[in-house]
Amino acid sequence: SHPPQARVSPMAAAGSSRRGPMDDDKLTFETSAGVDVVGSFDAMGIREDLLRGIYGYGFEKPSAIQQRAVVPIIAGRDVIAQAQSGTGKTSMVSLSVCQVIDTNIHEVQALILSPTRELATQTERVMQAVGNYMSVSVHACVGGKSIGEDIRKLEAGVHVVSGTPGRVCDMIKRRTLRTRAIKLLVLDEADEMLTRGFKDQIYDVYRYLPPELQVVLISATLPHDILEITSKFMTDPVRILVKRDELTLEGMKQFFVAVEKEEWKFDTLCDLYDTLTITQAVIFCNTKRKVDWLTERMRTNNFTVSAMHGDMPQKERDAIMSEFRSGTTRVLITTDVWARGLDVQQVSLVINYDLPNNRELYIHRIGRSGRFGRKGVAINFVRKDDIRILRDIEQYYSTQIDEMPMNVADLI
């Protein structure tokens, strides 16, 4: 059965979504010798029933990272790929994994670890969609869902597990997730998994896996801890790295609104509300408390908004996400838990109610709204003491952030 995500959204039907890869011909890569750029899915040596699933899902041409990484992964090489959300990395993982598993063997053959439940379930969905014609069974093993359900699914036999490190580790230790047939480990958003304190669990999981394992690591940034993992887990990896200054905010119009006091942000947001609901908008705050406070205050003033952060029960987060995905809710207030890897096609406006605490998070929040070259608008609320951070972000990404014009609604 098709997962819900496989239905093409109204935006996609208009031909503006995942049909064309990001304007990423402009990206420059530093790759290991011998990495070819393969410009079409047909030329990748992918099995017929998987190609049907890829085209059926609406992909036409591989994105830049897919053109470089899929073939080495399929060939069994260890791969380090530098990619952030919006580059087609989730579908790159999904189709590579579908290609390498043997559906006649009813055991787990590939394990994908992600930092958040949302990303792990999204990967499960994309994989079910592209693997639709080859009867791949995938199960998302994530915290907050019933352990009984995990045990039932795993004992029935699945080919791929997509999960968060804590729950996967737990399932392996309970001997419910059997690891003897696992030949591929994918670490998605590895930098974020480390930031979230999953380092020990990742090493734990790795210890339980067979020795002749293939490892693929995907990360937007490559700090020291990541390089340590690559040296311990990988053999002669193929490196596909975007040149530092080429990580792109292309196609994004970025603005700031100067607010003298914190309190003025709220009034500014209320003034912008009608503009927000033209499409769908995501509003980022730096803390869960701020999300709750802002949501409460917007509702008191009769504005319809939904909210999500990491302290909410999983069921509630799922419900909020699916309402937002389907377009039932138009404005989502959230923390950075949402910024990583989540694919909601309609979002063309992002508001940073609070500027992010570090530069890397900026591209994760903003890169979100201009997927694959979809145009997007980002508006940053900036207090006096934030100006320095804003200029720092501007310089770091060699981009331009101008004062918001009056006619911002026309740009969305």
Image: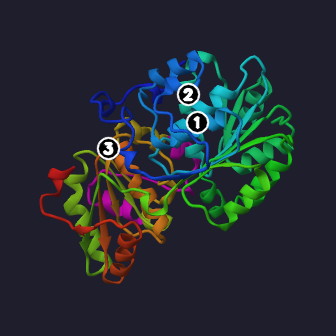
Q: To which residue does mark 1 refer? A: 70
The kind of residue tagged 1 is Val
Q: CA distance from mark 1 to mark 2?
A: 8 Å
Tell which residue pokes out farthest to the left in this image: 407
Callout 1–callout 2 Cβ contact below 8 Å: yes
The answer to whether one can see residue 124 in this image is: no
Residue 58 falls inside the magenta stretch = no
Q: CA distance from mark 1 to mark 3?
A: 23 Å
Location of residue 409 in the rendering, given as x and y in whole percent from the top left corner? 17, 53
In this view, the mark in front (3 or 2): 2
Q: Position of residue 380 (x, y in %)?
A: 31, 67
Label 3 element class: loop
Q: Which residues are magenta?
A: 293-318
The residue carrying mark 2 is 44
Q: Residue furthest front?
A: 33
Residue of label 3 = 374
Q: Are marks 1 and 3 in contact (CB under 8 Å)?
A: no
Q: Determine the image quadrant of residue 215.
A: top right
The mark lying in front, picked from 1 and 3, is 1
- The mark that comes first in sequence, 1 or 2, is 2
Q: Nearer the viewer, residue 321 or 160?
A: 160
Residue at 53 percent of width and 43 percent of height = 89
Q: Earlier in the sequence, mark 3 or mark 2?
A: 2
Mark 3 near mark 2, Cβ–Cβ under 8 Å? no
Q: Amino acid at mark 3?
A: Arg
Dot 2 amino acid type: Met
Residue sitting at x 58%, y 23%: 46
Q: Residue furthest bottom?
A: 385
